[in-house]
Amino acid sequence: MLAKPQNTISRKALTVWRISGVIRSMIGWTITAVILLLLDVFDAPFWISIILITLGVIFPLYHIVISPLFRWKSWRYEVREEEVELEEGIFIKTRTLVPMVRVQHVDTIQGPLLRKYKLASVLIHTAATAHEIPALEEDEAEELRKFISNLARVAEEDV
């Protein structure tokens, strides 16, 4: 069995994921407020409101505090001459091996939050799917993109 991947993603990912959690929570709170208003208008049982309010507290706590930390701690990757290995997962650990001969192209992507924190994600495309290494420092992501692209090109020539 291969050794566990050693490379980690940027610690700034915590901040980006927490901000994303706040945005999702605000959307959830808005929807919950509308539902609570409708429940009041239609004289629905009070226990439904209690459940919605409880969920409105628990889900943001998970998405803002708990999930980002565990996601960051669980993400690992390793680029080898023959493959890229990805390991992720909070409750269910997933280890993925992407053979270099299967890599078709490699991209870096940045949304507005990643750009603000000078982070980028690397997307590794194969014929079947795309694999993402999230939230790397911009320079590291660009170097990794070029490195994987070169290794994939060499692996393709060897076939």
Image (spheres, rainbow, N blue to C red):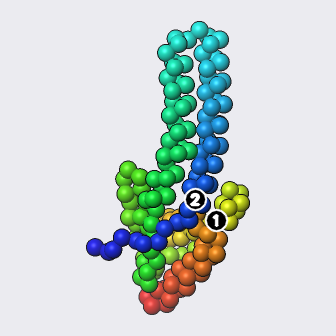
In the image as oriented, which residue stretches furthest toward the top? 43
Residue type beneath disc 2: Ala
Q: Is residue 148 left or right of residue 24?
A: left
Q: How crowded is the residue under tag 2: few (<14 C-alpha within 10 Å), some, or many (20+)?
A: many
Q: The C terminus appears in which quarter of the rendering? A: bottom left
Specify whether residue 45 is in view: yes
In the displayed structure, 62 sits above or below 50; it is below
Q: Is residue 155 left or right of residue 43?
A: left
In the displayed structure, 10 sits above or below 46; it is below
Specify whether residue 127 is in view: no
Element class at badge 2: helix
- In the rendered image, residue 47, in percent from the top left (x then y), is placed at 49, 15
Give the alpha-carbon distance from disc 2 to disc 1, as whole Å: 8 Å
Q: The N terminus appears in which quarter of the rendering? A: bottom left
Q: Which residue is mark 1?
A: 119
Residue type beneath disc 1: Leu
- In the rendered image, residue 52, in percent from the top left (x then y), is placed at 53, 25
- In the rendered image, residue 16, in percent from the top left (x then y), is placed at 62, 55
Element class at badge 1: strand
Give yes or no for contact between labels 2 and 1 (Cβ–Cβ under 8 Å). Answer: yes
In the image as oriented, which residue stretches furthest toward the bottom? 158
The residue lying at 50 percent from left, 41 percent from top is: 62
The residue lying at 51 percent from left, 82 percent from top is: 152
The residue lying at 50 percent from left, 76 percent from top is: 103
Q: Earlier in the sequence, mark 2 or mark 1?
A: 2
Q: Quadrant of residue 3?
A: bottom left
Q: Which residue is mark 2?
A: 13
Q: How crowded is the residue under tag 1: few (<14 C-alpha within 10 Å), some, or many (20+)?
A: many
